[in-house]
Image: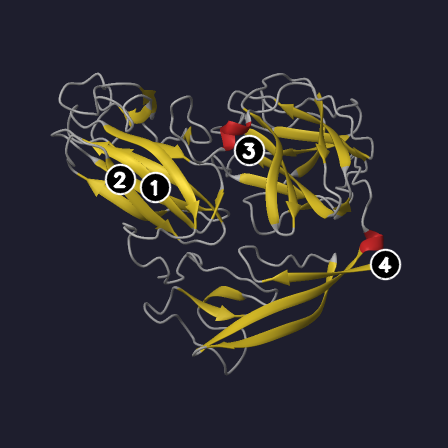
Amino acid sequence: MSKEFVCCTISNTSLDFDGDCAYYGILMLIFLQGTYLLFATCEFLVRDVSSLDPTGNCTFDQNQFCDWRNEKYADHFDWRLWRGSTPSSNTGPISDHTGNGSYIYIETSLPRKYNEKARLNSPWMRGAQRMTFYYSMYGSTIESLSIYVRINGSENRVWSRYRSHVSKDWIETCLTINYAGTYRVIIEGVAGLTYKSDIAIDDISFSKNLTCVSAGRNTPPGNFEANCTFDKSYCGWRNVLSPQDDIHWFRRRFNTPSHGTGPSQDHTGNGYYIYIETSQPAKEKHSAQLLSPLIRGPKCFRFYYHMYGSHMGNLDVFLQIRGQYGNYLMWQKSGEQGNQWREANIDLGYADEFQVVLNAVVGRGYQGDIAVDDVTFTDGLCESGSESRGGIGNCNFDVHFCFWRNVFYFQWTLKQYATPSWNTGPYADHTSGDTKKNTSL
């Protein structure tokens, strides 16, 4: 049996114990440097290379996923196997690509929420290949479909479609993966604003022939960029379409329409910025949310903001962790800040994937336009001048792990009341006695 030894170090990415790798041993190295002890841990895994599926082909006609697997931890819901029309009207295909088989799709009816993700992992694969498949994106609130390649714990988006197709027809497409080593392919479907956002995939095949002529047009790479001047577009940022999002962020050049509020030009003096218009029909407490693309931390988040006007509301920066519900408030400004652009520097210390939400709230009148310009993310924490709210590591574990995350296969878990074993562990959490606390498995 051919085997491959892989050293998986502790990093921003948790180890992947999924049956393809068998645990082999742990090597711990202790270094003495001055008065500090530095611990370096390396997990040695043995992967059976001879068992790698060289193709990953699947028609889904046998009502199975072949060697593809739904993600267990880093998404919100699963891809489904289906035959015929999807349950919801005016969305999804009416049959599989050939007309008489099965396919996979994401069902976006309740309880699904906007921007929730479903991810499907391929078997481990090796070498440069061409991936061909059929997809269906039919529905009035279609969101996005993306293909990632995971190499050594890092993911790269290699193909995408975004709100660009409303046809009932299946569309054939292909992409080339030019990598000689071992990797996984990940298919990610994202739920739209309503149930009319079902996305389907069928007949996946791989070939060593790398020639690829894809139907349709890829989403421009800039649509997934987090750093943005807003001079040409929103880049990878987009307005969140939800019932809580009463108004939108708009791109603008020069002054806003209302007198006595807003900037007269962008931060540099010759480009565009984004802002919220607080004149009617906007009302007090209405909010606009702008969502960033996925980002892997830790990062220093820098941007310029303009909050001038006697009716000013507030501007918030939230962190939305992938796979968790709810947002974390990282920064906030309220009230008038003067007729000038000001710089904000925020530490985003979470060491995994997240999204940033710019939330602007309307004040008590029309003189409350809020503007943002030139957003940038740099690796690591801010060197100086961070305005982050304190307590990024604080957590009561009543709902989730906050910014803490499991790293190894043997994991901590949330528990309510007593632990399962007799004569060990607490009977309740530290505070109320009836909420959750953290204990080991």
Nearer the N terminus, badge 3 or badge 4?
4
Does any portion of residue 363 appear in the rendered image?
yes
Image mark for residue 108: 3
| Residue pointed to by mark 2 | 343
* Viewer-proximal residue among 151 and 89: 151
**Residue 244 shows up from this direction:** no
Where disc 3 sits, the SS reads loop
The residue where tag 4 is placed is 2
Q: Three-letter amino acid code at disc 4?
A: Ser
The residue mark sitting in front, 2 or 4, is: 2
* Colour scheme shown: secondary structure
Picture disc at residue 411: none
Mark nearer the N terminus (1 vs 3): 3
| Residue 429 percent across, percent down from the top left | 39, 70
How far from the left and from the top, in percent, is residue 205?
79, 33
Would you identify the image quadrant in which residue 274 lies? top left
Going from N to C along the chain, the mark reached first, 3 or 2, is 3
Q: Residue at x 53, y 23 (%)?
A: 163
Q: Can you give x and y, in whole percent of width and height, for residue 357 in the image?
A: 37, 39
First reached walking from the N terminus: tag 1 or tag 4: 4
Classify 10 Å Cα crowding around label 2: few (below 14), some (14-19), many (20 and above). Answer: some
